């Protein structure tokens, strides 16, 4: 019998085996590889990970699910009871993957933690709301602060769209599976990513306003000077934040840091 899903934990049980198979395919698990799963819930994805040969570390915040997970998997997995945002993960090896149908109410916090804080996974394959997935993999013209942050720290791609009917109970929104292959931002981009994110945060603070007006105070330049900077970067002087690429934000951060 399927356990009652609790809204407080953001629980919706994934029941579509086709979606589970696509998650496993995207994960490209080598036998014996360490995989961290957040919120194993009823164990559907956990079982698929075990069957793929993964050494699963499953972190479950809902204490009422622990006994049933222990009975089902026993020593096949390492089961940890706790909040993924607060538990100490330094026991994880330098190389592991994060594969999970994550609670949607803490998606941003999970992304922030695992993209920026050691130990980082080499790959993440995560179920998120479709709207969030759209923002993560967005291209210039539709970029957001989330797009910039995720694409600074990882190569991202949408694996598959997932209809609400793939879950029990059915959520009110569709979902999508997104793959993140993490990179070392300083090695790839030659810059500390955090100043880039701070600048982008200002740039996205009001989507209706042009970028020169939003950045002039923090940049120490007036609007005309900023427009000149944009022109030198081959950007429209009246450009808005959503049109900049990650590379544009990096170049802009470099340029403004010199003033």
Image (tube, grey):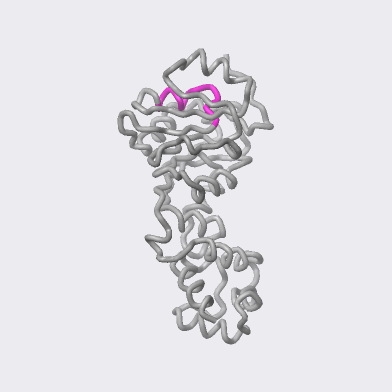
Residue 34: percent from left, percent from top: 39, 32
Query: Is 70 located above or below residue 6 in the figure?
Result: above
Looking at this view, name the residue that lies furthest to the left: 31
- Is 162 inside the magenta-drawn segment? no
Q: Picture coordinates of residue 53 (x, y %)?
A: 34, 26
- Nearer to us in this view, 161 or 38: 38
Residue at 66 percent of width and 77 percent of height:
217
Quarter of the image that includes the N terminus: top right
Name the spot of residue 57 as percent of width and height, x first.
46, 29
**Against 101, is 259 above or below?**
below
Location of the C terminus by quadrant is bottom right
Q: Quadrant of residue 202?
A: bottom right
In the image, residue 14 sits, relative to residue 255, either above or below, namely above
State the image coordinates of residue 65 (x, y, percent, origin top left). Answer: 59, 20
- Looking at the picture, tell me which residue is in the foreground, 234 or 246: 246
14 vs 208, left or right, is left
Residue displayed at 44% across by 32% down: 19
The residue located at (44%, 22%) in the rendering is: 77
In this view, the residue farthest toward the right is 8
Q: Residue at x 47, y 35 (%)?
A: 91
Stretch of the chain drawn in magenta: 39-49
């Amino acid at each position: 019998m399927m356990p009652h899903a609790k809204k407080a934990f953001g629980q919706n049980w994934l029941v579509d085996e086709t979606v589970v198979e696509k998650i496993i395919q995207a994960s490209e698990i080598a036998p014996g590889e360490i995989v961290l799963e957040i919120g194993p819930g009823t164990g559907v994805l956990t079982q698929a990970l075990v069957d793929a040969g993964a050494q699963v570390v499953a972190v479950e915040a809902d204490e009422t699910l622990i006994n049933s997970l222990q009975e089902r998997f026993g020593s096949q997995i390492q089961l940890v009871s706790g909040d993924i945002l607060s538990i100490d993960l330094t026991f994880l090896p330098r190389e592991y993957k994060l594969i999970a149908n994550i609670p949607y109410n803490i998606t941003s916090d999970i992304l922030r933690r695992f993209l920026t804080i050691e130990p980082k996974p080499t790959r993440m394959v995560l179920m998120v709301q479709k709207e969030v997935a759209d923002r993560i993999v967005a291209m210039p013209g539709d970029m957001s602060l989330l797009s910039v942050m995720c694409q600074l720290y990882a190569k991202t791609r949408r694996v598959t769209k997932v209809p609400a009917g793939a879950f029990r109970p059915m959520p009110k929104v569709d979902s999508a599976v997104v793959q993140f292959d993490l990179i070392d931002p300083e090695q790839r981009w030659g810059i500390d990513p955090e100043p880039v994110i701070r600048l982008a945060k200002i740039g996205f603070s009001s989507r209706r306003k042009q970028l020169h007006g939003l950045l002039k105070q923090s940049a120490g330049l007036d609007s005309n000077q900023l427009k000149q900077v944009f022109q030198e970067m081959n950007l429209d002087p009246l450009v808005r934040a959503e049109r900049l690429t990650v590379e544009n934000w990096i170049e802009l951060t470099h340029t403004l840091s010199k003033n």
